[in-house]
Amino acid sequence: MTLEELQLSCRRIYIEDLRLLARLGIYPHEIAAAQEILISASVWVDKKPLGEDIENTVSYATLAEIARRIVRSHHFLVETVVEEMIREIRVLPGVRAGRVDCRKLHAVTGADASGVEEFFLNE
């Protein structure tokens, strides 16, 4: 399935630029002090009538909760944060596809951010 087909047949649920403090990195100065990171996550679910019932969809609050919990678990690599988030998000009921992006704001001098983004598609 192409991204265009997903966009036409699905609804996107997302959080954008969730600001969290994390001890991410491989260098002592990165681990010693928490640094601000941004996390964005999107899932695509089938368009269907919801009947005003949150149980019929994925809550964006759930995406934020997953991000907060994983960041608190003290991973060293941004890649690991993204992998762990995808592992949990992809099994949520109704999720057809998703994207997770984690950015460090002060890792590279002169850059607004640096990070890792990964997409997934459930078959």
Image (cartoon, rainbow, N blue to C red):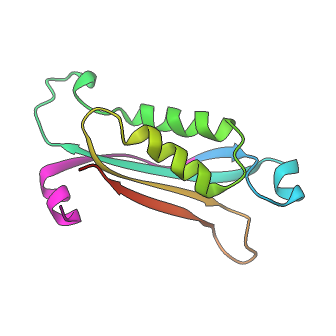
| Residue 17 is inside the magenta segment | yes
Q: Residue furthest bottom?
A: 110
- x, y percentage for residue 87? 46, 43
Question: Residue at 54% of width from left, 44% of height from top?
Answer: 84
Residue 109 % position (x, y): 76, 75
Left or right: 3, with 100 as reference point: left
Q: Of all residues shown, which one is farthest toward the front?
A: 123
The reply, left or right, for residue 56 in relation to residue 119 is left
The answer to whether 40 appears left or right of 44 in the picture is: right
Magenta residues (range): 1-18
For residue 13: magenta?
yes
Classify 119 as above or below 122. below
Residue 39 in the image: above or below residue 94: below
Give the number of marks.
Answer: 0
Q: Residue 107's quadrant in the figure?
A: bottom right
Q: Position of residue 48 (x, y in %)?
A: 11, 36
Q: Looking at the rendering, which quadrant does residue 49 occupy?
A: top left
Residue 82 vertical position relative to residue 48 in the rendered view, above or below: below
**Looking at the rendering, in which quadrant would you find the N terminus?**
bottom left
Name which residue lies at 63% across and 67% down: 113
| Residue at figure coordinates x 83%, y 51% from the top left | 31
**Foreground of the two, 53 or 24:** 24
